[in-house]
Image (cartoon, rainbow, N blue to C red):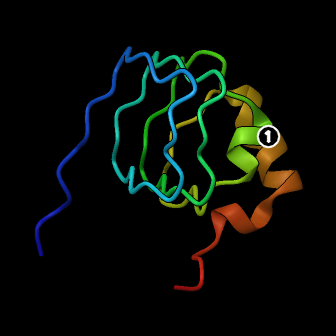
């Protein structure tokens, strides 16, 4: 089975974008502007959020999954794992 294509949103202006339930597996969101972006239920497996701007714990708490090496700035990774451990587990389909 082929790996999913990497979606490139590096530096993109995604302010107030509705990405609810989006499949962002392997997406490159480095330096993306994410203020008010709806990530509810989004699949963020292996996505790269390093340096993303205006990303919040609240936004990340609503995603479907952060499994398999999702790249987050350190300020998010530890608090998310403590407060929302289920985001790092395989979700029920």
Q: Badge 1: few (under 14), some or many (20 or more) residues near its Cα, within 10 Å?
A: few
For the residue pair 23 and 2, the one nearer the viewer reads as 23
Q: Using residue 19 as the reference point, say whether residue 88 is left or right of it.
A: right
For the residue pair 26 and 32, the one nearer the viewer reads as 32
Q: Residue at x 63, y 27 (%)?
A: 73
Q: Which residue is mark 1?
A: 58
Please state the horizontal and vertical placement of residue 56, each as a whole percent of the image. 74, 30
For the residue pair 20 and 87, the one nearer the viewer reads as 20
Q: Residue at x 11, y 67 (%)?
A: 2
Q: Residue at x 54, y 21 (%)?
A: 15
Q: Secondary structure at mark 1?
A: helix
Compared to 64, does 25 lie above or below? above
Q: Residue furthest right?
A: 83
Compared to 74, does 33 lie above or below? above
Q: Using residue 41 as the reference point, say whether residue 14 is left or right of it.
A: left
For the residue pair 86 and 93, the one nearer the viewer reads as 93
Q: Residue at x 43, y 22 (%)?
A: 30
Please state the horizontal and vertical placement of residue 1, each as a whole percent of the image. 12, 76
Please state the horizontal and vertical placement of residue 80, each as a whole percent of the image. 78, 47
Please state the horizontal and vertical placement of residue 57, each as a whole percent of the image. 78, 37
């Amino acid at each position: 089975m082929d790996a999913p294509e990497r979606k490139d949103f590096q530096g993109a202006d995604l302010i107030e974008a509705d990405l609810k339930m989006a499949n962002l597996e392997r997406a490159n969101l480095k330096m993306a502007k994410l203020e008010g972006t709806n990530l509810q239920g989004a699949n963020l497996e292996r996505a790269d959020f390093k340096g993303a701007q205006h990303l919040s714990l609240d936004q990340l708490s609503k995603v479907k999954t952060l499994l398999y090496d999702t790249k987050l700035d350190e300020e998010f990774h530890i608090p998310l794992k403590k407060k929302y451990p289920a985001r790092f587990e395989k979700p029920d389909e």
